[in-house]
Image (spheres, rainbow, N blue to C red):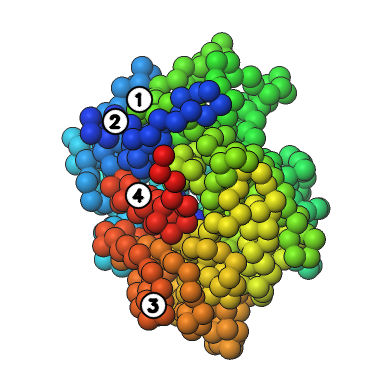
């Protein structure tokens, strides 16, 4: 499904990272301005305070997110400025498992029978992840050594003696599956892959679900029987026409595959496939996409989520009494990352709001009572000074309604209109959703309205809307961004003469495209590692993307045959048209949008005599992992906008 792969293709880029812990005394000093907004004292804060929030991410494995005795929760956090692995006690005390200040590490799973931990991480944003085990003595042991490989943790056998890792060490274009012994880390190759996407492995280790992506509108699920050694995958989704399928995982008893399909309407439904009878039936149907489904270790509880108009709605369902579980004592917000203790008496989960990054909670399932374990916002930020977003719609050039997420500054009014930015997500098929973004809140806190536009081609609004940009990227989707300005101009409290555009990755591409092909529409542009030369970008796709590359070629055009169109929609070749100030930021280790893309764009625009602010981070990739760099980037963006977009205040 294109929705599943959107994040794989080109990341959102402008990361709305939740951040972490106690800021230093110098950071706690609140900036600077205290203004009266509706008779309420209003404070603006420096970028450091927004990014000094703490990011928390629970372990990747839902069944082994707690230690074997249930006393510790496994998580990742950037409280030191970069992600490391931690355990957290039920009283909220965090203990580091890794102490990297260079490369990020993410916790994947506890071992089922002891306190060893599976950890994963790349090298400076190059996306070539390795999988490690943290031994009981603290040693970090690389289970997947090598210089050019990519590896991922896949899961555990139900007996707790075997775990699975995928790696492309044999063939760069395919991820093979290895079974590792938990006692000595010896391994066996159990599935030699041929360019299929690994979905999930059954708890009993007998079945492997794989997805073949023909296009982003058409895919299939295959099952390989690992027990019989007949590992030739069997097609289980025979169909005609364009239907997308994706694997959610297997049920705990290994009898059924949980899968997604858009066969019966605009949105993904959750279905089951019975491995013995080969029968399929509906499990969860909704008016929006079913994002995921999984079960607790015994199968008593089912967890599912629906993407409802940019808001994740999660349900914890008790299959014993066929009723949803109510969790007491938690604020309104988006629940995610539910993790169970082995005895299923307790869960941990994350909760996110527009005005606070994810905090970690734990709930006693017997009483329903919840306890908050973390405080993601630093003490220097008053949450009342942050902004809750509104979901809006606006008409595009052809009358199509475009969804958006609108953040209005508290300072904005008809008497004191605010400059504005159209924010564009990555993808092409990404989606802007509600939830905390340090960068957006920093912008809004400093007086900039932000409209996060979900232009045609965005996920979450049905398959028809999703495919409206196919083979016309930089055309109709770009017009949706152009018409976003018209919508902003219609709102009270907006400075109609000062509206810019900002985006990361594919959103960076549309940002620069707007500045190039519609040079009079936006007053400034902020490009975060955006594509500027489609000929080069499509040819440089990493080998490990495998069949996703072919699907992307189907959507974007094949560089071998569509050079003329790719050149026409690539801003680099038409950069002489750019006349408005431009901010460009790039990670030197980015494997998706190469540094040369930004280097050449900056050189070309400066040749026009146009003001360009170029920031290059030598230790980042496609998405900034280090807090210090996120702070620098946010600061530089606001400084750039204050210079080129905001009208100076008249002296008193």
Can you tell which of label 3 and label 2 is closer to the viewer?
A: 3
Would residue 166 be visible to someone looking at this image? no
Give the class, few, some or many, for how many residues have Cα within 10 Å of label 2's Cα (few <14, many ≥20). some
Q: Which picture quadrant has residue 519?
A: bottom right
The residue sitting at 55% across, 15% down in the picture is 329
Label 3 to label 4, Cα distance in Å?
24 Å
Q: Which picture quadrant has residue 108?
A: top left
Can you tell which of label 3 and label 1 is closer to the viewer?
A: 3
Which residue was labeled with disc 1?
Answer: 379
Above or below, 43 relative to 167 = above
Numbered disc 4: secondary structure? helix
Which residue was labeled with disc 4?
Answer: 635
Give the image location of residue 606, x and y in percent: 37, 76
Numbered disc 3: secondary structure? loop
Can you tell which of label 2 and label 1 is closer to the viewer?
A: 2
Which residue was labeled with disc 2?
Answer: 28
Quadrant, the N terminus: bottom right
Give the image location of residue 240, x and y in percent: 79, 67
Which of disc 4 and disc 1 is earlier in sequence? 1
Which residue was labeled with disc 3?
Answer: 609
- Say which of 649 and 632 sits in front: 649
Above or below, 633 relative to 326 = below
Label 1 to label 4, Cα distance in Å?
20 Å
Give the image location of residue 360, x and y in percent: 44, 27
The residue sitting at 55% across, 51% down in the picture is 420
Q: Are marks 1 and 4 in contact (CB under 8 Å)?
A: no
């Amino acid at each position: 499904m294109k929705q599943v792969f959107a994040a794989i293709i080109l990341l959102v880029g402008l990361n709305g990272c939740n951040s972490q812990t106690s800021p230093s005394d110098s950071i706690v000093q609140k900036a600077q301005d205290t203004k009266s907004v509706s008779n309420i004292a209003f404070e603006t804060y420096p970028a450091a305070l927004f990014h000094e929030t703490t990011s928390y991410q629970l372990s990747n494995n839902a069944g082994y997110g707690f230690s074997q005795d249930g006393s510790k929760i496994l998580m990742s956090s950037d409280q030191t400025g970069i992600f490391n692995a931690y355990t957290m006690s039920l009283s909220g005390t965090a203990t580091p498992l890794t102490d990297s200040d260079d490369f990020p590490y993410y916790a994947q799973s506890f071992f089922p029978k002891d306190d060893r931990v599976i950890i994963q991480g790349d090298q400076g944003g190059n996306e070539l992840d390795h999988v490690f085990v943290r031994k009981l003595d603290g040693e970090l042991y690389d289970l997947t050594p090598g210089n050019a490989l990519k590896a991922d943790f896949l899961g555990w056998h139900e007996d707790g003696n075997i775990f699975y890792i995928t790696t492309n060490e044999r063939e760069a274009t395919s991820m093979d599956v290895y079974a590792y012994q938990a006692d000595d880390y010896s391994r066996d190759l159990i599935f030699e892959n041929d360019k299929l996407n690994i979905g999930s492995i059954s708890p009993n280790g007998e079945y492997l679900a794989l997805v073949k992506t023909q296009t982003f509108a058409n895919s299939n699920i295959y099952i390989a029987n690992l027990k019989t050694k007949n590992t030739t995958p069997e097609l289980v989704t025979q169909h005609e026409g364009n239907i997308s399928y994706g694997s959610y995982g297997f049920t705990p008893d290994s009898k059924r595959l949980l899968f997604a399909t858009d066969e019966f309407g605009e949105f993904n439904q959750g279905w089951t496939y019975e491995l013995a009878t080969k029968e399929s039936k509906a499990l969860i149907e909704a008016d929006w996409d079913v994002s995921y489904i999984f079960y607790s270790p015994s199968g008593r509880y089912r967890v599912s989520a629906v993407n409802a108009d940019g808001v994740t709605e999660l349900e914890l369902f008790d299959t014993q009494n066929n009723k949803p579980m109510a969790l007491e004592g938690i604020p309104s917000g988006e629940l995610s990352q539910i993790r169970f203790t082995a005895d299923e008496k307790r869960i941990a989960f994350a909760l996110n709001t527009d005005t606070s990054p994810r905090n970690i909670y734990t709930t006693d399932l017997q009483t329903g009572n919840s306890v908050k374990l973390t405080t993601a916002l630093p003490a220097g930020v008053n949450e009342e000074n942050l902004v809750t977003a509104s979901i809006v719609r606006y008409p595009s050039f052809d009358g199509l309604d475009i969804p958006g997420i609108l953040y209005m500054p508290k300072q904005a009014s008809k008497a004191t209109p605010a400059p504005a930015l159209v924010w564009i997500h990555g993808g092409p098929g990404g989606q802007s959703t509600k939830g905390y973004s340090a960068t957006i809140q920093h912008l809004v806190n400093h007086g900039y309205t932000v409209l996060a536009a979900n232009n045609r081609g965005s996920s979450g609004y049905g398959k028809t809307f999703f495919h409206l940009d196919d083979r016309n990227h930089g055309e109709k989707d770009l017009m949706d961004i152009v018409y976003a300005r018209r919508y902003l101009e219609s709102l009270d409290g907006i400075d109609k003469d000062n509206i810019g555009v900002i985006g990361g990755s594919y959103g960076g591409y549309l940002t620069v495209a707007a500045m190039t092909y519609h040079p009079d529409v936006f007053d400034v542009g902020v490009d975060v590692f955006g594509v500027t030369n489609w000929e080069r970008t499509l040819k440089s796709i990493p080998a490990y993307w495998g069949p996703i590359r072919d699907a992307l070629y189907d959507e974007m055009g094949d560089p071998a045959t569509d050079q003329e169109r790719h050149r026409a929609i690539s801003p680099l070749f038409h950069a002489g048209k750019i006349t408005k100030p431009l901010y460009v930021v790039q990670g030197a280790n980015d494997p998706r949008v190469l540094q040369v893309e930004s280097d050449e764009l900056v050189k070309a625009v400066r040749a026009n005599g146009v003001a360009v602010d170029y920031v290059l981070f030598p230790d980042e990739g496609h998405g900034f992992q280090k807090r210090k760099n996120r702070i620098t980037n946010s600061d530089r963006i606001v400084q750039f906008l204050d210079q080129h977009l905001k009208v100076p205040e008249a002296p008193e």
